[in-house]
Amino acid sequence: NNADAGFAGLVGSQAAAAQSQLAYSRDWEREADRSGMKTLVGSGLDPFAMPSMFQQMLAANRYNERPPEFLLTHPVTDSRISDAANRAEAYPSQPRTRSFNFLILQQRSRIFYRLPSSEQLPYFANAVEKTKDQKERDSYRYTQAWIHKQRREYQQSVNFLNRISDDNQDQPAVSILMAESLSQLGQGKKAIELLENAYLLRPDSYPIAISLANIKTENGQAKQAISDIERWSERRGTDPIIWKQVSDTAHKADNLVLAYRARAEYFFLFGQKNNAMRQLQKAIELAEKKSNFQQEVGLRQRLIQMSESQESLSL
């Protein structure tokens, strides 16, 4: 009858639309993979690492009841691996190197996607005993320390970090984790001194700068941290993390105009335009009360820029 025919037509239309959307998404996925391959090659890295990575991801999640969320929307399939391998053939193979940072990120991926909480420490303890590679052993010890810190076992974290070899003791990730653990143990002065020395060695290290500002703020030195963290906000103005740190630091330093302005930038970068403009309006009102005309003018100009932007309004 007509009702059945209409229902069948509706289902058919929905199915066709879903299929069209799926094909559209896959086209974008292929384009993203092509772009990723160009970036890989342009960075001097091995193009064959992409299909190799896809193969490992597929093998690691083939029998999982629920794979990681990013694989639900962008699944790794045999055809995707084949496409990546075919693209890699167009470029010369490059030697693969593994930095300390790469290794600790690799261990972090194991924690998040493959190892239940109860198996994490035994796995890495066993890995330390098995490997003969110093850099790899240090990455396992760092990961053991990171696990203990996540569990608020800060002294154990420090103990494992102290076992890292001299070759990797000055790695930014090691210095940051050590400082964070020391701060939690009530050794804020030592933590700040450690990061200040690390910052002298690597003045362009954004992670060290963020961690130093955070630890100074936690230990009552927010005013001393503001100038440096503000400079980083000028260099990385599109990074919401830096604006959140500026806001937290400024708030602890009782610089509420800066705190509101930084929180406005943070909201704006996340597309929350209405919230951003409300925060900026608070900053303007405070600047007006303080009779800081120059600051007020700058804030009003930024408010106009935000209001004229094409970003969608959010609550």
Image (cartoon, helix red, strand yellow):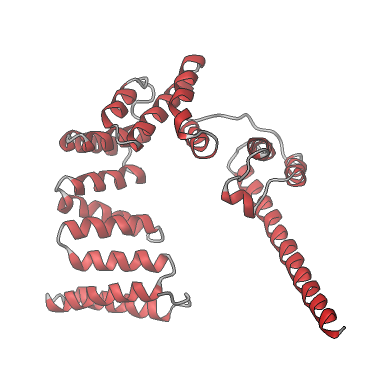
Question: Which quadrant of the figure has residue 304?
Answer: bottom left
Q: Nearer the viewer, residue 168 or 182?
A: 182
Quadrant of res 205 = top left
Looking at the rendered structure, the number of numbered marks drawn on it comes to 0
Please say whether residue 199 is visible from this viewpoint.
yes
Q: Residue at x 51, y 15 (%)?
A: 130
146 up-or-down from 124: above or below:
below
**Quarter where residue 160 is shown:** top left
Measured as percent of width and height from the top left, residue 231 is found at: 28, 55
* Residue at 22% from the left image edge and 37% from the top image edge: 183
Residue farthest toward the right in the current orientation of the protein: 1
| Residue depicted at x 21% and y 73% | 295
Q: Residue at 23% across / 64% down in the picture? A: 259
Q: Residue lying furthest left in this view?
A: 290
Q: Position of residue 49 (x, y in %)?
A: 65, 36
Image quarter in which the N terminus is found: bottom right
Q: Quadrant of the C terminus?
A: bottom left
Residue 175 in percent (x, y) is at: 31, 33
**Most distant residue in the bottom direction:** 2
Can residue 236 be seen?
no
Q: Position of residue 164 (x, y in %)?
A: 36, 22
